Amino acid sequence: MRWLSCSFRFCSIRSFLSQLSLVSFVLLPLFFFSLTSAQSSTILHLPIFHLRTQIKFTLLVHCHILPKDHTLAPTLAMASSTALLPKDRKKDDHVGLPLHHQSINSDSSQPIFLRVCHSPWISIGQKALVGLRSLTASYLFVSFLAIINYDLERNKTGLFTIFKFSNIAYFIQLLYNAIAAVSLFSAARVQANLCRPTLSCISTIRTTEVSPGPSRPACRVSSRLPARTIRPKTAPGSASSTLLRTHFHLPPQLCTGLSWSQRSMPP
Amino acid sequence: MVPTEHATIIPGTSSSLALRTLLTLSGGRTFGRDWYTTFFVLDKYAVSAVIAFAEVFFLSSIKRQEVDIIALLRACSQLTRMQPLSAHLFGLAFLCFLYIGWAYIGYVVTGKYVWWFLDHNQVKWEFVVAGWVAFAALTGICEPSSFLSSLTLTF
Protein backbone atom coordinates (compact mmCIF):
# COMPACT_ATOMS: atom_id res chain seq x y z
CA MET A 1 0.00 0.00 0.00
CA ARG A 2 2.91 2.35 0.62
CA TRP A 3 4.12 2.36 -2.96
CA LEU A 4 0.57 2.85 -4.15
CA SER A 5 0.07 5.93 -2.02
CA CYS A 6 3.48 7.28 -3.13
CA SER A 7 2.61 6.86 -6.76
CA PHE A 8 -0.72 8.52 -6.23
CA ARG A 9 0.89 11.42 -4.39
CA PHE A 10 3.07 12.23 -7.38
CA CYS A 11 0.37 12.33 -9.99
CA SER A 12 -2.08 15.16 -9.68
CA ILE A 13 -5.69 14.34 -9.03
CA ARG A 14 -6.95 16.25 -12.00
CA SER A 15 -4.85 14.39 -14.55
CA PHE A 16 -5.75 11.15 -12.87
CA LEU A 17 -9.45 11.90 -13.15
CA SER A 18 -9.13 13.03 -16.75
CA GLN A 19 -7.38 9.79 -17.68
CA LEU A 20 -10.07 7.85 -15.91
CA SER A 21 -12.84 9.69 -17.70
CA LEU A 22 -11.08 9.25 -21.04
CA VAL A 23 -10.90 5.51 -20.54
CA SER A 24 -14.52 5.43 -19.47
CA PHE A 25 -15.67 7.38 -22.47
CA VAL A 26 -14.05 4.81 -24.68
CA LEU A 27 -15.30 1.84 -22.70
CA LEU A 28 -18.83 2.82 -21.79
CA PRO A 29 -20.22 2.42 -25.32
CA LEU A 30 -18.66 -1.02 -25.34
CA PHE A 31 -20.40 -1.72 -22.06
CA PHE A 32 -23.82 -0.76 -23.32
CA PHE A 33 -23.21 -2.58 -26.57
CA SER A 34 -22.40 -5.73 -24.68
CA LEU A 35 -25.62 -5.30 -22.72
CA THR A 36 -27.76 -5.01 -25.78
CA SER A 37 -26.45 -8.19 -27.30
CA ALA A 38 -27.71 -10.87 -25.00
CA GLN A 39 -25.01 -13.32 -25.95
CA SER A 40 -21.91 -11.44 -24.97
CA SER A 41 -23.24 -9.96 -21.76
CA THR A 42 -21.66 -11.50 -18.73
CA ILE A 43 -24.49 -10.46 -16.45
CA LEU A 44 -26.99 -12.72 -18.12
CA HIS A 45 -25.30 -16.00 -17.35
CA LEU A 46 -27.12 -16.81 -14.17
CA PRO A 47 -27.61 -20.25 -12.69
CA ILE A 48 -30.62 -22.40 -12.08
CA PHE A 49 -31.03 -25.47 -10.01
CA HIS A 50 -30.82 -28.51 -12.17
CA LEU A 51 -34.13 -30.04 -11.34
CA ARG A 52 -34.78 -33.65 -12.02
CA THR A 53 -37.92 -32.71 -13.89
CA GLN A 54 -35.95 -30.41 -16.05
CA ILE A 55 -33.63 -33.20 -17.06
CA LYS A 56 -36.58 -35.39 -18.00
CA PHE A 57 -38.07 -32.45 -19.82
CA THR A 58 -34.99 -31.88 -21.93
CA LEU A 59 -34.56 -35.58 -22.58
CA LEU A 60 -38.05 -35.86 -23.88
CA VAL A 61 -38.33 -32.64 -25.79
CA HIS A 62 -35.12 -33.15 -27.63
CA CYS A 63 -36.27 -36.67 -28.34
CA HIS A 64 -33.11 -38.57 -27.85
CA ILE A 65 -34.38 -40.56 -24.93
CA LEU A 66 -37.99 -41.21 -24.16
CA PRO A 67 -39.04 -42.70 -20.87
CA LYS A 68 -40.06 -46.31 -21.19
CA ASP A 69 -43.37 -45.69 -19.52
CA HIS A 70 -45.28 -43.15 -21.51
CA THR A 71 -46.98 -41.68 -18.51
CA LEU A 72 -44.73 -38.68 -18.41
CA ALA A 73 -44.87 -38.02 -22.09
CA PRO A 74 -48.13 -36.05 -22.49
CA THR A 75 -47.47 -33.46 -19.82
CA LEU A 76 -43.86 -33.05 -20.71
CA ALA A 77 -44.52 -32.82 -24.39
CA MET A 78 -46.94 -30.01 -23.70
CA ALA A 79 -44.49 -28.20 -21.51
CA SER A 80 -42.54 -26.71 -24.36
CA SER A 81 -43.28 -25.97 -27.92
CA THR A 82 -39.82 -25.97 -29.37
CA ALA A 83 -37.12 -28.50 -29.82
CA LEU A 84 -34.66 -26.17 -31.37
CA LEU A 85 -31.78 -27.15 -29.17
CA PRO A 86 -30.41 -30.57 -29.91
CA LYS A 87 -29.49 -32.60 -26.88
CA ASP A 88 -26.07 -33.70 -27.96
CA ARG A 89 -24.89 -30.12 -28.21
CA LYS A 90 -26.12 -29.01 -24.83
CA LYS A 91 -22.78 -29.59 -23.15
CA ASP A 92 -21.13 -27.14 -25.48
CA ASP A 93 -23.53 -24.29 -24.87
CA HIS A 94 -21.29 -21.91 -23.09
CA VAL A 95 -18.11 -23.09 -24.65
CA GLY A 96 -19.52 -22.04 -27.95
CA LEU A 97 -18.22 -24.79 -30.15
CA PRO A 98 -19.61 -24.47 -33.64
CA LEU A 99 -23.15 -25.67 -33.96
CA HIS A 100 -24.72 -26.70 -37.18
CA HIS A 101 -26.97 -23.66 -37.28
CA GLN A 102 -24.21 -21.26 -36.44
CA SER A 103 -23.41 -20.99 -40.07
CA ILE A 104 -26.32 -18.66 -40.59
CA ASN A 105 -26.43 -17.04 -37.20
CA SER A 106 -23.80 -14.96 -35.59
CA ASP A 107 -21.56 -16.58 -33.06
CA SER A 108 -23.57 -19.15 -31.13
CA SER A 109 -26.43 -16.89 -30.19
CA GLN A 110 -28.89 -19.75 -30.18
CA PRO A 111 -28.36 -21.61 -26.91
CA ILE A 112 -28.46 -18.57 -24.67
CA PHE A 113 -31.51 -17.28 -26.48
CA LEU A 114 -33.26 -20.59 -26.07
CA ARG A 115 -32.38 -20.69 -22.41
CA VAL A 116 -33.85 -17.26 -21.88
CA CYS A 117 -37.04 -18.21 -23.70
CA HIS A 118 -37.78 -21.46 -21.90
CA SER A 119 -38.79 -21.88 -18.32
CA PRO A 120 -37.38 -24.89 -16.47
CA TRP A 121 -40.71 -25.43 -14.74
CA ILE A 122 -43.32 -27.64 -16.32
CA SER A 123 -46.24 -25.55 -15.16
CA ILE A 124 -44.93 -22.45 -16.92
CA GLY A 125 -45.54 -23.04 -20.59
CA GLN A 126 -44.65 -20.81 -23.45
CA LYS A 127 -47.92 -18.91 -23.38
CA ALA A 128 -47.62 -18.22 -19.67
CA LEU A 129 -44.00 -17.24 -20.19
CA VAL A 130 -44.91 -14.67 -22.81
CA GLY A 131 -47.52 -13.22 -20.46
CA LEU A 132 -45.24 -13.16 -17.44
CA ARG A 133 -42.37 -11.62 -19.31
CA SER A 134 -44.46 -8.88 -20.86
CA LEU A 135 -46.05 -8.19 -17.45
CA THR A 136 -42.64 -7.93 -15.79
CA ALA A 137 -41.21 -5.73 -18.50
CA SER A 138 -44.16 -3.34 -18.48
CA TYR A 139 -44.11 -3.11 -14.67
CA LEU A 140 -40.39 -2.40 -14.68
CA PHE A 141 -40.83 0.26 -17.33
CA VAL A 142 -43.56 2.10 -15.45
CA SER A 143 -41.86 1.85 -12.08
CA PHE A 144 -38.55 2.98 -13.60
CA LEU A 145 -40.25 6.12 -14.84
CA ALA A 146 -41.81 6.64 -11.40
CA ILE A 147 -38.47 6.20 -9.64
CA ILE A 148 -36.66 8.60 -11.93
CA ASN A 149 -39.48 11.07 -11.47
CA TYR A 150 -39.17 10.76 -7.68
CA ASP A 151 -35.43 11.33 -7.81
CA LEU A 152 -35.85 14.38 -9.99
CA GLU A 153 -38.85 15.95 -8.31
CA ARG A 154 -38.59 15.03 -4.65
CA ASN A 155 -34.92 14.25 -4.05
CA LYS A 156 -33.85 16.95 -6.51
CA THR A 157 -30.71 15.08 -7.51
CA GLY A 158 -30.76 16.54 -11.01
CA LEU A 159 -28.08 15.23 -13.32
CA PHE A 160 -26.69 13.18 -10.44
CA THR A 161 -29.59 10.76 -11.01
CA ILE A 162 -27.91 9.02 -13.91
CA PHE A 163 -24.79 8.37 -11.83
CA LYS A 164 -26.48 6.62 -8.94
CA PHE A 165 -25.77 2.93 -8.82
CA SER A 166 -29.32 1.93 -7.95
CA ASN A 167 -30.75 3.77 -10.93
CA ILE A 168 -28.22 2.21 -13.28
CA ALA A 169 -28.90 -1.26 -11.90
CA TYR A 170 -32.63 -0.72 -12.29
CA PHE A 171 -32.15 0.44 -15.86
CA ILE A 172 -30.05 -2.60 -16.73
CA GLN A 173 -32.70 -4.87 -15.28
CA LEU A 174 -35.35 -3.09 -17.32
CA LEU A 175 -33.20 -3.45 -20.43
CA TYR A 176 -32.72 -7.18 -19.94
CA ASN A 177 -36.41 -7.77 -19.31
CA ALA A 178 -37.44 -5.70 -22.31
CA ILE A 179 -35.04 -7.54 -24.63
CA ALA A 180 -36.16 -10.91 -23.31
CA ALA A 181 -39.85 -10.05 -23.63
CA VAL A 182 -39.54 -8.69 -27.16
CA SER A 183 -37.42 -11.57 -28.42
CA LEU A 184 -39.68 -14.14 -26.76
CA PHE A 185 -42.75 -12.55 -28.27
CA SER A 186 -41.24 -12.53 -31.75
CA ALA A 187 -40.06 -16.11 -31.28
CA ALA A 188 -43.54 -17.21 -30.30
CA ARG A 189 -44.94 -15.51 -33.37
CA VAL A 190 -42.35 -17.14 -35.60
CA GLN A 191 -43.08 -20.53 -34.12
CA ALA A 192 -46.80 -20.08 -34.61
CA ASN A 193 -46.33 -19.10 -38.22
CA LEU A 194 -43.52 -21.31 -39.31
CA CYS A 195 -43.25 -24.41 -37.24
CA ARG A 196 -46.82 -25.56 -36.89
CA PRO A 197 -46.43 -28.79 -38.89
CA THR A 198 -43.39 -29.63 -36.86
CA LEU A 199 -45.21 -29.00 -33.60
CA SER A 200 -48.05 -31.27 -34.54
CA CYS A 201 -45.41 -33.80 -35.36
CA ILE A 202 -43.98 -33.49 -31.87
CA SER A 203 -47.35 -34.14 -30.34
CA THR A 204 -47.66 -37.38 -32.30
CA ILE A 205 -44.75 -38.76 -30.34
CA ARG A 206 -47.06 -39.25 -27.40
CA THR A 207 -49.05 -41.85 -29.19
CA THR A 208 -46.27 -43.47 -31.15
CA GLU A 209 -44.58 -46.58 -29.96
CA VAL A 210 -40.90 -45.92 -29.53
CA SER A 211 -38.47 -48.72 -29.32
CA PRO A 212 -35.29 -48.09 -27.36
CA GLY A 213 -31.74 -48.85 -28.31
CA PRO A 214 -30.50 -48.94 -31.88
CA SER A 215 -33.49 -47.10 -33.27
CA ARG A 216 -32.79 -43.98 -31.24
CA PRO A 217 -31.97 -41.86 -34.26
CA ALA A 218 -35.33 -42.84 -35.67
CA CYS A 219 -37.20 -41.27 -32.77
CA ARG A 220 -35.78 -37.85 -33.38
CA VAL A 221 -38.18 -35.16 -34.33
CA SER A 222 -36.36 -34.67 -37.55
CA SER A 223 -37.20 -38.03 -39.03
CA ARG A 224 -40.89 -37.63 -38.27
CA LEU A 225 -41.48 -34.48 -40.24
CA PRO A 226 -44.17 -34.64 -42.87
CA ALA A 227 -43.25 -33.66 -46.35
CA ARG A 228 -45.32 -30.51 -46.25
CA THR A 229 -42.89 -28.77 -43.90
CA ILE A 230 -41.90 -25.38 -45.12
CA ARG A 231 -38.63 -25.84 -46.84
CA PRO A 232 -36.32 -22.94 -47.47
CA LYS A 233 -35.03 -22.67 -50.96
CA THR A 234 -31.54 -21.97 -49.72
CA ALA A 235 -29.00 -23.96 -47.86
CA PRO A 236 -28.10 -22.48 -44.45
CA GLY A 237 -24.59 -21.48 -45.35
CA SER A 238 -25.28 -20.35 -48.88
CA ALA A 239 -24.92 -16.86 -50.17
CA SER A 240 -28.62 -16.25 -50.51
CA SER A 241 -29.35 -17.09 -46.89
CA THR A 242 -26.58 -14.76 -45.85
CA LEU A 243 -28.23 -12.15 -48.01
CA LEU A 244 -31.54 -12.85 -46.27
CA ARG A 245 -29.97 -12.40 -42.89
CA THR A 246 -27.85 -9.38 -43.58
CA HIS A 247 -29.93 -7.34 -45.98
CA PHE A 248 -33.47 -8.08 -44.97
CA HIS A 249 -32.72 -8.11 -41.24
CA LEU A 250 -34.36 -11.37 -40.48
CA PRO A 251 -34.49 -11.99 -36.76
CA PRO A 252 -32.24 -14.82 -35.60
CA GLN A 253 -35.26 -16.79 -34.43
CA LEU A 254 -36.59 -16.89 -37.95
CA CYS A 255 -33.20 -18.00 -39.20
CA THR A 256 -33.28 -20.75 -36.61
CA GLY A 257 -36.67 -21.86 -37.74
CA LEU A 258 -35.53 -21.93 -41.31
CA SER A 259 -32.41 -23.86 -40.54
CA TRP A 260 -34.32 -26.20 -38.32
CA SER A 261 -36.83 -27.16 -40.93
CA GLN A 262 -34.01 -27.42 -43.41
CA ARG A 263 -32.04 -29.69 -41.14
CA SER A 264 -34.99 -31.79 -40.25
CA MET A 265 -35.90 -32.72 -43.79
CA PRO A 266 -34.98 -36.30 -44.51
CA PRO A 267 -32.26 -36.51 -47.10
CA MET B 1 -15.08 7.76 9.91
CA VAL B 2 -18.25 7.18 7.92
CA PRO B 3 -19.78 10.59 7.31
CA THR B 4 -23.42 11.00 8.00
CA GLU B 5 -25.92 11.91 5.30
CA HIS B 6 -24.13 9.64 2.88
CA ALA B 7 -26.18 6.49 2.76
CA THR B 8 -29.55 8.12 3.03
CA ILE B 9 -32.23 6.85 0.74
CA ILE B 10 -34.44 9.85 1.36
CA PRO B 11 -32.62 13.11 2.15
CA GLY B 12 -33.47 14.60 5.49
CA THR B 13 -34.02 11.34 7.28
CA SER B 14 -30.44 11.21 8.59
CA SER B 15 -30.48 7.44 8.70
CA SER B 16 -26.88 6.91 7.77
CA LEU B 17 -26.69 3.27 8.75
CA ALA B 18 -28.68 0.32 7.56
CA LEU B 19 -29.51 -0.48 11.17
CA ARG B 20 -31.03 2.92 11.71
CA THR B 21 -32.95 2.53 8.47
CA LEU B 22 -34.36 -0.71 9.80
CA LEU B 23 -35.29 0.95 13.05
CA THR B 24 -37.27 3.57 11.22
CA LEU B 25 -39.27 0.96 9.36
CA SER B 26 -42.38 1.47 11.47
CA GLY B 27 -43.46 5.04 11.84
CA GLY B 28 -40.05 6.42 11.08
CA ARG B 29 -39.23 9.19 8.72
CA THR B 30 -38.21 6.97 5.80
CA PHE B 31 -41.53 5.21 5.76
CA GLY B 32 -44.93 6.58 6.58
CA ARG B 33 -44.51 9.88 4.81
CA ASP B 34 -46.71 9.26 1.79
CA TRP B 35 -47.40 6.45 -0.59
CA TYR B 36 -44.94 7.71 -3.20
CA THR B 37 -41.98 7.61 -0.82
CA THR B 38 -42.93 4.16 0.40
CA PHE B 39 -43.31 2.95 -3.16
CA PHE B 40 -39.96 4.49 -4.10
CA VAL B 41 -38.02 2.75 -1.34
CA LEU B 42 -39.78 -0.59 -1.54
CA ASP B 43 -39.78 -0.83 -5.32
CA LYS B 44 -36.20 0.26 -5.79
CA TYR B 45 -34.65 -1.90 -3.12
CA ALA B 46 -36.99 -4.86 -2.62
CA VAL B 47 -39.31 -5.45 -5.57
CA SER B 48 -36.54 -5.31 -8.14
CA ALA B 49 -34.61 -7.96 -6.22
CA VAL B 50 -37.70 -10.17 -6.06
CA ILE B 51 -38.18 -9.76 -9.81
CA ALA B 52 -34.56 -10.68 -10.43
CA PHE B 53 -34.83 -13.85 -8.35
CA ALA B 54 -38.05 -14.83 -10.10
CA GLU B 55 -36.25 -14.34 -13.38
CA VAL B 56 -33.38 -16.57 -12.30
CA PHE B 57 -35.39 -19.36 -10.74
CA PHE B 58 -38.65 -19.47 -12.64
CA LEU B 59 -38.60 -17.73 -15.99
CA SER B 60 -35.33 -18.63 -17.67
CA SER B 61 -33.21 -21.72 -17.98
CA ILE B 62 -29.92 -19.91 -18.07
CA LYS B 63 -27.33 -21.98 -16.32
CA ARG B 64 -24.02 -21.40 -14.70
CA GLN B 65 -20.99 -21.81 -16.90
CA GLU B 66 -19.36 -25.16 -17.06
CA VAL B 67 -16.05 -25.38 -15.33
CA ASP B 68 -14.70 -28.17 -17.45
CA ILE B 69 -11.02 -28.73 -18.05
CA ILE B 70 -11.56 -30.58 -21.30
CA ALA B 71 -13.87 -27.92 -22.60
CA LEU B 72 -11.34 -25.33 -21.56
CA LEU B 73 -8.59 -27.09 -23.46
CA ARG B 74 -10.79 -27.49 -26.49
CA ALA B 75 -11.75 -23.86 -26.34
CA CYS B 76 -8.16 -22.70 -26.20
CA SER B 77 -8.09 -22.74 -29.96
CA GLN B 78 -11.08 -20.42 -30.01
CA LEU B 79 -10.28 -17.87 -27.36
CA THR B 80 -13.10 -15.54 -28.27
CA ARG B 81 -15.68 -18.17 -27.53
CA MET B 82 -14.33 -19.34 -24.20
CA GLN B 83 -16.67 -18.57 -21.32
CA PRO B 84 -15.74 -20.39 -18.14
CA LEU B 85 -16.73 -19.19 -14.70
CA SER B 86 -13.50 -17.29 -14.17
CA ALA B 87 -14.08 -15.30 -17.34
CA HIS B 88 -17.53 -14.52 -16.03
CA LEU B 89 -16.19 -13.21 -12.72
CA PHE B 90 -13.49 -11.27 -14.51
CA GLY B 91 -16.04 -9.62 -16.75
CA LEU B 92 -18.14 -8.73 -13.71
CA ALA B 93 -15.18 -7.10 -11.98
CA PHE B 94 -14.43 -5.24 -15.19
CA LEU B 95 -17.97 -3.86 -15.27
CA CYS B 96 -17.61 -2.80 -11.63
CA PHE B 97 -14.47 -0.81 -12.40
CA LEU B 98 -16.28 0.66 -15.36
CA TYR B 99 -18.99 1.89 -13.02
CA ILE B 100 -16.39 3.40 -10.71
CA GLY B 101 -15.06 5.33 -13.67
CA TRP B 102 -18.61 6.45 -14.39
CA ALA B 103 -18.94 7.58 -10.76
CA TYR B 104 -15.82 9.73 -11.12
CA ILE B 105 -17.28 11.22 -14.28
CA GLY B 106 -20.30 12.00 -12.15
CA TYR B 107 -18.03 13.80 -9.68
CA VAL B 108 -16.49 15.86 -12.48
CA VAL B 109 -19.93 16.75 -13.84
CA THR B 110 -21.95 17.32 -10.69
CA GLY B 111 -19.30 17.84 -7.99
CA LYS B 112 -20.70 15.12 -5.75
CA TYR B 113 -19.35 11.69 -4.97
CA VAL B 114 -21.62 8.71 -5.35
CA TRP B 115 -20.11 6.99 -2.32
CA TRP B 116 -18.19 8.49 0.54
CA PHE B 117 -15.28 6.10 0.15
CA LEU B 118 -14.57 7.40 -3.33
CA ASP B 119 -13.74 10.79 -1.82
CA HIS B 120 -10.00 11.06 -1.27
CA ASN B 121 -10.48 14.13 0.90
CA GLN B 122 -12.35 12.11 3.47
CA VAL B 123 -10.33 8.91 3.34
CA LYS B 124 -6.77 8.24 2.29
CA TRP B 125 -5.94 7.21 -1.24
CA GLU B 126 -5.06 3.66 -0.29
CA PHE B 127 -8.48 3.25 1.26
CA VAL B 128 -10.05 4.68 -1.86
CA VAL B 129 -8.28 2.01 -3.93
CA ALA B 130 -9.24 -0.58 -1.36
CA GLY B 131 -12.81 0.60 -1.76
CA TRP B 132 -12.67 0.01 -5.50
CA VAL B 133 -11.33 -3.51 -5.02
CA ALA B 134 -13.81 -4.26 -2.26
CA PHE B 135 -16.69 -3.13 -4.45
CA ALA B 136 -15.61 -5.43 -7.27
CA ALA B 137 -15.04 -8.33 -4.88
CA LEU B 138 -18.37 -7.83 -3.13
CA THR B 139 -20.18 -7.82 -6.45
CA GLY B 140 -18.46 -11.07 -7.38
CA ILE B 141 -19.44 -12.63 -4.05
CA CYS B 142 -23.00 -11.37 -3.98
CA GLU B 143 -23.59 -12.37 -7.55
CA PRO B 144 -25.78 -15.46 -7.46
CA SER B 145 -23.67 -17.72 -9.63
CA SER B 146 -20.89 -17.58 -7.09
CA PHE B 147 -22.63 -18.67 -3.96
CA LEU B 148 -25.18 -20.87 -5.65
CA SER B 149 -22.64 -22.85 -7.64
CA SER B 150 -21.99 -25.17 -4.72
CA LEU B 151 -25.72 -25.67 -4.31
CA THR B 152 -26.10 -26.46 -7.97
CA LEU B 153 -23.59 -29.25 -7.72
CA THR B 154 -25.73 -31.07 -5.18
CA PHE B 155 -28.58 -31.57 -7.62
Image: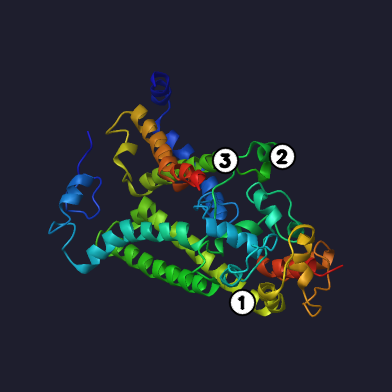
Could you confirm whether marks 2 and 3 are on the same chain?
Answer: yes
- In the rendered image, the residue lying farthest to the top is A2
Give the image location of residue B8, x and y in percent. Answer: 23, 50
| Disc 2 target residue | B74
Report the quarter where the N terminus of chain A lies: top left
| Disc 1 target residue | A189
Q: Is residue A247 visible?
A: yes
Residue closer to the observer: B117 or A39? A39
Mark 2–mark 1 Cα distance, whole angstroms, equals: 37 Å
Relative to B32, A19 lies left or right = right
Give the image location of residue A225, x and y in percent. Answer: 77, 74
User: What residue do we see at 76% from left, 57% from top?
Assistant: A213
Give the image location of residue B45, x and y in percent. Answer: 31, 56
Badge number at residue B82: none
Q: Is residue A164 visible?
A: no
Residue closer to the observer: A12 or A120? A120
| Disc 3 target residue | B87
- Label 1 neighbour load within 10 Å: few <14, some 14-19, many 20+: some
Do labels 2 and 3 touch, CB within 8 Å?
A: no
Labels 2 and 3: the sequence-earlier one: 2
Residue type highlighted by circle 3:
Ala
Mark 3–mark 1 Cα distance, whole angstroms, equals: 35 Å
Residue closer to the observer: A110 or B106? A110
Relative to A56, A135 lies left or right = left
Residue type highlighted by circle 2:
Arg
The quarter of the picture where residue A209 lies is bottom right
Relative to A38, B33 lies left or right = left
Residue type highlighted by circle 1:
Arg
User: Which chain is disc 3 placed on?
Assistant: B
The quarter of the picture where residue A114 lies is bottom right
Mark 2–mark 3 Cα distance, whole angstroms, equals: 16 Å
- Label 3 neighbour load within 10 Å: few <14, some 14-19, many 20+: few
